[in-house]
Amino acid sequence: MAVYGKHNPERDYQEKHYQAVWDEVQKTKIFEKVLQIVQNKMPEGDADQFVAVREALQNALSPIQWDKLMKTSEVMYAQRFDGPTSLQLVLLRIPDGGAESLKKGIVNLFNLASTASEGKVPVATETVAGVELTYLQVPREVPVKFQPAVGVKGDVIILTTSLELATESLELLANPSGESKFDDPRVTEALASLP
């Protein structure tokens, strides 16, 4: 399955309404209040650990330029079923360094996961079609294909649950003459019958 979306400038008038809602959400400090409620309900030792984890997550995500995420101009989502699970791939076009900032935050989360696993889930990099992908090396003992990865090419960020799917997609983008599902005669026949 694949879905593509592009910014529609005719809807730009809605942005001021979205911003007004977000401003009100921030004024209420609802996120901070919920975290405080959770923390207050915990035993003291757990509360200290909760604060440490919260601060680590906040630090990891601090490079992300959240305002630029709202300026995403294109989105592509793909899903491929693979046995009992599905593999996910998302491409987002985020201008002005937004894609790179999001990658930094996600790589920081990968590093936190690696540290928490005491190195059992190391972070690695691989270059595919000129794009450096950073991913978690999930142990083979994990029964499902899950290898989250992130990469940036220009102002496009690649997010995936499968290094394999990202690799195939980037190779296809680099060499569009490669084989795709649209080369399947059944797909060609089905598309030809559409109005």
Image (cartoon, rainbow, N blue to C red):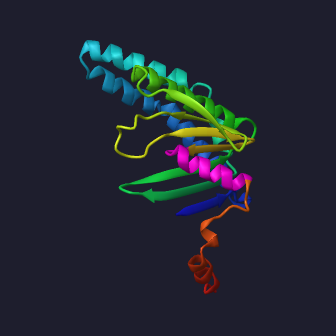
Q: Where is residue 183 shown, x and y percent of the image?
A: 64, 71
Could you say which is closer to the camera, residue 183 or residue 103?
183
Residue projecting furthest to the left: 43
Occupied quadrant, residue 102: top right
Q: Which residue occupies the foreground of this view, 136 or 99?
A: 136
Instruction: Please give the name of the residue rendered at 54% of the width and 43% of the height, measured from the top-left corner.
Output: 163
Does 165 appear in magenta? yes
Query: Image height check: is 35 above or below 43?
Result: below
Task: Report x, y in % for residue 188.
Answer: 62, 79
Quadrant placement of the C terminus? bottom right
Using the rendered image of the protein, determine whether residue 22 is visible from the camera's viewpoint: yes
For residue 141, side relative to residue 102 (left or right): left
Relative to 131, 32 lies left or right: left
Q: Is residue 27 above or below residue 10?
A: above
- Is there any visible trace of residue 65 in the rendered image? no
Where 180 falls versus 95 (above or below)?
A: below
Inspect the magenta stretch and tell me whether residue 78 lies in it: no
Residue at horizontal 56 percent and vertical 79 percent from the top: 186
Residue 48 position within the rendered picture, expressed as x and y whole percent measured from the top left: 34, 13
Horizontal arrangement in the rendering, residue 134 relative to residue 146 (left or right)? right
- Magenta segment, which residues? 160-174
Q: Main secondary structure of the magenta part?
A: helix
Q: Position of residue 151 (x, y in %)?
A: 63, 39
Q: Which residue: 49% across, 45% down?
A: 161
195 above or below 122?
below
* Residue shown at 47% from the left, 23% from the top: 112
